[in-house]
């Protein structure tokens, strides 16, 4: 199944994508995280019941999980990306947090921050947790996965490198994206076979295989759940492959008018235009 979040009647809603229609599911669970917590069997039963059907065209996309408890991202997790960055292979995953308001949905504009000229692109596969837990063993970790989605886990490079902590460069408002939908785990029994590609204005920028991950998805879930409990709807971004803008000669950063796409065959294609941050956004009004 493909689970999609969107605005409906001015409020966040979610449903099951069916070709060019969406089966509205908010009568069963108010949000996707609640549905994921209920488990795949209950979700499948609810999907077979009659309900309101919406035209997909014209819906304003939201990130699949609108307000996850945790968004945890992993840096330098592709071997080839570590090499292009001139770094040593890490002994442990490098994990940092991202805030929900730093991400937009499919087709929504990503903001290039007014204080930086170095908004870099990063295509990633994101894992969404279904069954939560703590101290999850790696050999059971995929049982805790609800599904997968695409992430533009972009970085504001100068702010990222102000000090050893990358948090400022990873959390500018609307600087990244998540979507277009969540593909349930039953459709992707072996995510290690996936490829992550990115395109900037139609030009291929990144093309990496999940088999190049230094720390696999089960390893990441086991490691992260060692220090924090995971809950349904939590998002884990698995890292970006080689080809980011900062390592190119000359460097290539996102600009107003660009279109950045994350393409993961079997998962989806996330497309976002890039615009300059408005001089006065609603947070300042």
Image: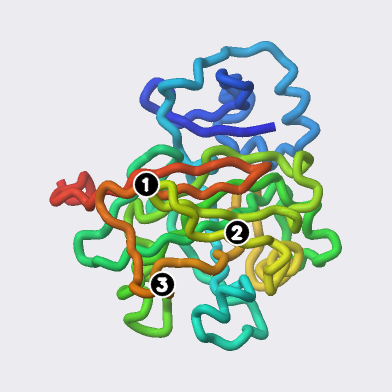
Q: Tag 1, which secondary structure?
A: strand
For the residue carrying disc 3, how many other residues have a C-alpha within 10 Å: few (<14), some (14-19), or many (20+)?
A: few
Residue 16 place in picture, x, y as percent: 62, 26
Q: Gap in Å between the C-alphas at discs 1 and 3?
A: 18 Å
Q: Is residue 56 above or below residue 84?
A: above
Q: Is residue 185 above or below residue 215?
A: above
Which residue is more in the foreground, 211 or 72? 211
Q: Residue at x 65, y 47 (%)?
A: 148
In the image, farthest residue toward the right: 139
Q: Gap in Å between the C-alphas at discs 2 and 3?
A: 27 Å
Q: Tag 2, which secondary structure?
A: strand
Q: Tag 3, which secondary structure?
A: loop
What residue sits right under mark 3 in the picture?
248
Q: Are marks 1 and 3 in contact (CB under 8 Å)?
A: no
Tag shown at residue 236: 2
Residue 214 place in picture, x, y as percent: 68, 74
Q: Residue at x 53, y 60 (%)?
A: 206
Residue 106 place in picture, x, y as percent: 45, 39
For marks 1 and 3 on the same chain, the one whose residue lies earlier in the sequence: 3
Q: Gap in Å between the C-alphas at discs 2 and 1?
A: 24 Å
Q: Is residue 87 above or below residue 174?
A: below
Q: Which image quadrant is residue 108 in?
A: top left
Q: Are marks 2 and 1 in contact (CB under 8 Å)?
A: no
For marks 2 and 3 on the same chain, the one whose residue lies earlier in the sequence: 2
Residue 9 place in picture, x, y as percent: 39, 20
For the residue carrying disc 2, how many other residues have a C-alpha within 10 Å: few (<14), some (14-19), or many (20+)?
A: many
Q: Is residue 88 left or right of residue 222?
A: left
Q: Which image quadrant is residue 107 in?
A: top left
For marks 2 and 1 on the same chain, the one whose residue lies earlier in the sequence: 2
Which residue is more in the foreground, 7 or 114? 114
What residue sits right under mark 1 in the picture?
259
Mark 2 vs mark 1: in front: 1
């Amino acid at each position: 199944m493909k689970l999609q979040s969107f605005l409906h009647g001015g409020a966040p809603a979610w449903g099951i994508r069916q070709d060019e229609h969406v089966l509205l599911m908010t009568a069963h669970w108010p949000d996707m995280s609640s549905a994921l917590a209920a488990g795949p069997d209950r979700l499948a039963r609810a999907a077979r019941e009659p309900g309101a059907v919406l035209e997909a065209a014209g819906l304003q996309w939201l990130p699949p999980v609108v307000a996850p408890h945790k968004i945890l991202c992993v840096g330098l997790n592709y071997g080839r990306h570590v090499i292009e960055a001139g770094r040593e292979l890490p002994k442990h995953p490098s994990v940092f947090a991202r805030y929900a308001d730093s991400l937009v949905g499919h087709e929504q504009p990503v903001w290039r921050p007014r204080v930086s000229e170095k908004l870099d692109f990063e295509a990633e596969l994101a894992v969404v947790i279904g069954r939560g837990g703590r101290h999850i063993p790696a050999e059971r970790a995929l049982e805790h996965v609800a599904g997968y989605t695409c992430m533009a886990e972009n970085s504001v490079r100068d702010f990222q490198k102000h000090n050893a902590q990358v948090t400022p460069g990873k959390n500018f408002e609307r600087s990244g994206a998540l979507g277009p939908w969540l593909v349930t785990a039953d459709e992707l029994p072996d995510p290690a076979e996936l490829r992550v590609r990115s395109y900037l204005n139609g030009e291929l920028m990144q093309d990496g295989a999940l088999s190049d991950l230094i720390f696999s998805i089960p390893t990441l879930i086991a490691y992260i759940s060692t220090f924090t409990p995971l809950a349904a709807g939590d998002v884990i971004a698995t890292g970006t492959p080689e080809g980011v803008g900062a390592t190119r000669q000359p460097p290539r950063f996102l600009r107003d008018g660009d279109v950045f796409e994350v393409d993961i065959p079997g998962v989806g294609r996330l497309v976002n235009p890039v615009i300059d941050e408005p001089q006065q956004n609603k947070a300042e009004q």
